[in-house]
Amino acid sequence: MTQDELKQAVAQAAADYVAANVPAGSIIGVGTGSTANFFIDAIAPLKDKYKGAVASSEATKKRLEGHGFPVLDLNDVDSIPVYVDGADEIDGGLNMIKGGGGALTREKIVAAVAQTFVCICDASKRVEVMGKFPLPVEVIPMARAHVARELAKLGGTPVLREGFVTDNGNLILDVKGLAITDPKGLEAQINQITGVVTNGLFAVRPANVLLLGTAEGVKTIV
Ligand code: 5RP
């Protein structure tokens, strides 16, 4: 199976999970990226069952609306039973690195509201220790150099994502060379740097369910 076929299989499994577990009339949280795009396509037939979705990026909002799926403002929503999103890396504790697509801040906000985070990944994303994938950090533009110096003190090599501006008007520093043995501690430490909006570690709020696409089929890990 190709990587895209694995992504499509987990996306369909997530749509089946939503259909089976999320009551009609609910609001679904929807992530960003190529795997999330397959999920959006897979839930399109459910658009009359649910009240709508909260999108974690402008790109996701556009794709949902393209399918006629209503998109709601998070501020108008009290509860999101399930948030479905991909990841760049995920470890055995279901901690993740996210933000390869640059949507980490909005993803973290929607995930914070959701009761259950369902991560959908192909098997290449499952790692023992995170950090091979550079850790994205969203920064306020005027703080870029300061934050880069502080990240270097933590042992990483921050690289500005050239020509990229987030949906929030900020920049991304991708931090290479980190071996992340304490994801929760590092997430909190980086978020303490003045000028950081948030970082792509999802360890304070990890996934609850992992649907992992493998050559042997989709595995459910909780
Ligand atoms: C976007 C993300 C994505 O979930 C992550 O980059 C995985 O993307 P893909 O499904 O395309 O491999 O965090 O900000």
Image: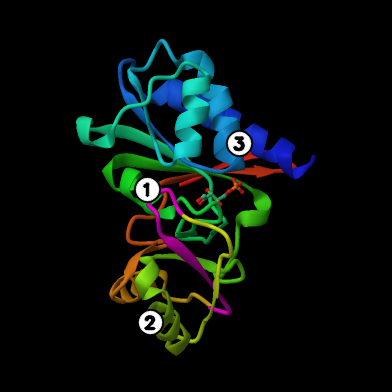
Q: Residue at x 40, y 59 (%)?
A: 170
Alpha-carbon distance for marks 2 and 1?
A: 23 Å
Q: Residue at x 46, y 56 (%)?
A: 94
* 70 sits to left or right of 11: left
In the picture, residue 100 is in which quadrant?
Answer: bottom right
Residue 146, disc: 2
Q: Amino acid at mark 2?
A: His
155 in relation to 142, above or below: below
Residue closest to the eye, 162 or 212: 162
Find out whether residue 174 is within the magenta segment: yes
Q: Residue at x 27, y 36 (%)?
A: 74
51 in relation to 181, above or below: above
Q: Amino acid at mark 1?
A: Arg
Magenta residues (range): 166-178
Q: Position of residue 36 (x, y in %)?
A: 54, 38
Q: Amino acid at mark 3?
A: Val
Residue 106, disc: 1
In the picture, residue 188 is in which quadrant?
Answer: bottom left
Label 3 secondary element = helix
Alpha-carbon distance for marks 3 and 2?
A: 40 Å
Residue at numbered disc 3: 10
Residue that protrudes farthest toward the top in the picture: 48
Mark 1 Cβ inside 8 Å of ligand 1: no
